[in-house]
Image: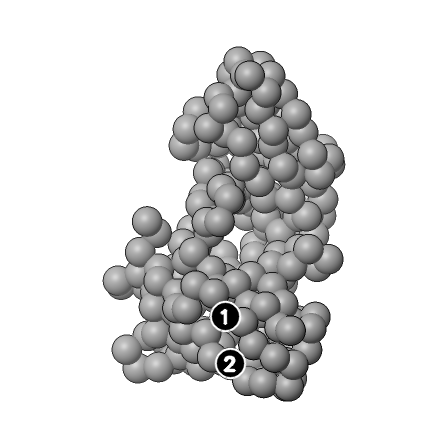
Amino acid sequence: AQSVTQLGSHVSVSEGALVLLRCNYSSSVPPYLFWYVQYPNQGLQLLLKYTTGATLVKGINGFEAEFKKSETSFHLTKPSAHMSDAAEYFCAVSDLGSSNTGKLIFGQGTTLQVKP
Amino acid sequence: DSGVTQTPKHLITATGQRVTLRCSPRSGDLSVYWYQQSLDQGLQFLIQYYNGEERAKGNILERFSAQQFPDLHSELNLSSLELGDSALYFCASSVAGQGTETQYFGPGTRLLVL
């Protein structure tokens, strides 16, 4: 069975600093991995995803993530934080199991605070 | 705007009652998912439908049921409500319900059970 662990429920950075949000996964099959962002009082929005191919994935709003199979990680980064990046971020894996259903298993989420 | 609509936005009800949450997927999407977001459980998958048929089931209580109608909208029915059912309920949709697809989330229905 697949699972996701996000290290750090709260991350605080200064505006302009590097953003690094950590995600480790467990999967018995090649995983499909996603990062979603949730702004206050809104639904989730896809930032980026990895299915196959290039392991460095670029997403919206300057975010990117690198799939590292040897480390079972899919960390999210952004070179320079902006105040508008303050939100909750969720890492997720498709629960492939015995059938390809698209069901997502989410990590517990990381709240990103950006200080001026 | 994801194109997924959910009604109502907020719902306040009492224990023991029954409520229905409604979701309309993006135009062209055949698959609908329901998720529950709560402080103690986080984001949990409840159930998935594809073109009117149930495709996958998660940790959905027996008191909860769902269906997808011929026009592809979906309803989540919650009955015999308990205080612990208070949560944010999200609907998401995707084209064909496959693991590689992006799921587009609605704004959610916030349920408060008093």
| Amino acid on which the number 1 mark rests in the picture | Leu
Whether residues under marks 1 and 2 lie with C-beta atoms below 8 angstroms apart, the answer is yes
Quarter occupied by the N terminus of chain A: bottom right
| Amino acid on which the number 2 mark rests in the picture | Val
Q: Can you see residue A73? A: no
Q: Which chain does the residue under circle 2 lie in?
A: B
The residue sitting at 46% across, 49% down in the picture is A42
Q: Which residue is mark 1?
A: B11
In the rendered structure, find residue A20 and report the number of the disc placed on it: none
x and y, in percent, of residue A13 in the image: 63, 20
The residue sitting at 43% across, 63% down in the picture is B9
Q: Is residue B6 above or below residue B49?
A: above
In three-dimensional space, the C-alpha distance between marks 1 and 2, rounded to whole angstroms, equals: 8 Å
x and y, in percent, of residue A10 in the image: 69, 34
Q: Can you see residue B84? A: yes
The residue sitting at 31% across, 61% down in the picture is B26
x and y, in percent, of residue B73 in the image: 34, 74
- Camera-nearest residue between A74 and B12: B12
The residue sitting at 54% across, 37% down in the picture is A87
User: In the rendered view, does B62 fall on the left or right side of A100?
Assistant: right
- Camera-nearest residue between A32 and B34: B34
Which badge, 1 or 2, is on the more N-terminal residue?
1
Crowd tier of the residue under label 1, counting other residues whose Cα lies within 10 Å: few below 14, some 14–19, many 20 or above: some
Judge depth for marks 1 and 2 and give the one in front.
Answer: 1
Q: Secondary structure at mark 1?
A: strand
Q: Which residue is mark 2?
A: B19
**To which quarter of the image does residue A6 belong?**
top right
User: In the rendered view, does B7 fall on the left or right side of B35?
Assistant: left
